[in-house]
Image (cartoon, rainbow, N blue to C red):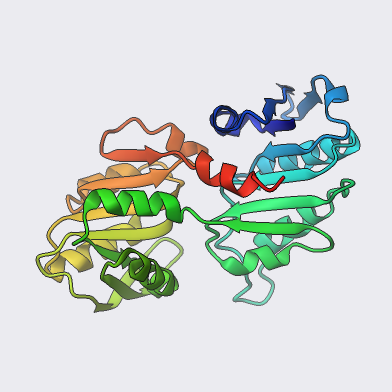
Amino acid sequence: MINLFSAETYRYLQNKLQKLNSEFTIGEIETCKFPDGEIYHRIINPEKIRNRPAVLISGTISDAAVMETYNLACELVGQQCSSLHLVIPYFGYSTMERAVRVGEVVPAKNIARLLSTIPLSAQGNFIYLIDLHSLGVQYYFEGSVHTVHLTSEPVIRRIVAELGAETVLASTDMGRAKWIEKMSQRLNLESAYLMKERLSGSQTRVVALSANVRGRDVAIYDDMIRSGSSIINAARAYKEAGARKIYVLTTHGVFVPGALENMKKCGLIEKIFCTDTHPQAETVCDDWVKIYDIAPVINSGLLTI
């Protein structure tokens, strides 16, 4: 049997995974937040952890979440789990993976370094990441940590199949162009991509388009949606190039306040398809946004335990 734990924000994924795999036993964690903001955790029935694999679903969606992940993982190893499997569905700060100006802090690297210092379990520590914004982040982990990069491709394939074989799979920028091209080839679809420049932290501008979308439905993929400005700019560019219906696909629905409203208000997007790697996506109550379960992808990655 495998002990399955989660941070409070990822309890929904813990329950979904347990239903998929009878090998998982739900591990309970008592959590309490004190008036000064400090958080207390206690693993209930820690004697059940000894000499058994432990899976922890947690994340780095905030600074507090980073410390919660670190503290819980350290305690699981401290209770002598045979192996530690840390699942991070959404790796926060992944867009801050390198310095472009002197003196800039690189949080993605620092978080990876911190998680690399979790004490090693007897059979090793494994960290599972999903659709990283920058694939290089997985190489920031140090020491004997084993990183496993999972992809939401099985989910994307399902969505594209529902949209139809004539759909053009498109990217928001050159950063995902190769990924889109390879995926399109596997699905026997045409692909399209945009070139854009960033004007500020939240503003971008399309400068070129390489696409054959006139009279075609377009499915724009981006690994994450935060403000939605890149999606709106891309949708506008594809629409101006003659696209018929435009759909949006994303793995990580971060959806900062106002993002969904702005994308809906632009009037260019038929529907958004998203997985539940980020807790924010789980709270969306709008038929315009269809949420897909990422638990089967995680379960497949954990089958080797």
* 120 relative to 260 in the view: left or right: right
Residue drawn at x 56%, y 66% is 134
Give x and y (percent) for residue 207: 29, 78
Q: Quadrant of residue 211?
A: bottom left
Q: Residue at x 11, y 68 (%)?
A: 242
- Give the answer, above or below, for where 146 lies relative to 282: below
State which quarter of the image contains the N terminus: top right
| Image position of 231 (left or right of 257) | left
Nearest the camera: 176 or 261? 176
User: Between residues 193 and 149, which one lies in front from this camera angle?
Assistant: 149
* Left or right, residue 238 beside residue 122: left
Q: Is residue 199 visible?
A: no
- Given residues 217 and 154, the one toward you in this image is 154
| Residue nearer the viewer, 162 or 78 | 162
At 76% across and 30% down in the image, what residue appears? Answer: 38
In percent of width and height, residue 124 lies at 83, 51
Figure check: 305 above or below 117: above
Q: Is residue 239 visible?
A: yes
> Which quadrant holds residue 195?
bottom left
Residue 109, horizontal then vertical, whole percent = 70, 63
Q: Locate residue 140 relative to residue 150 in the image: left or right.
A: right
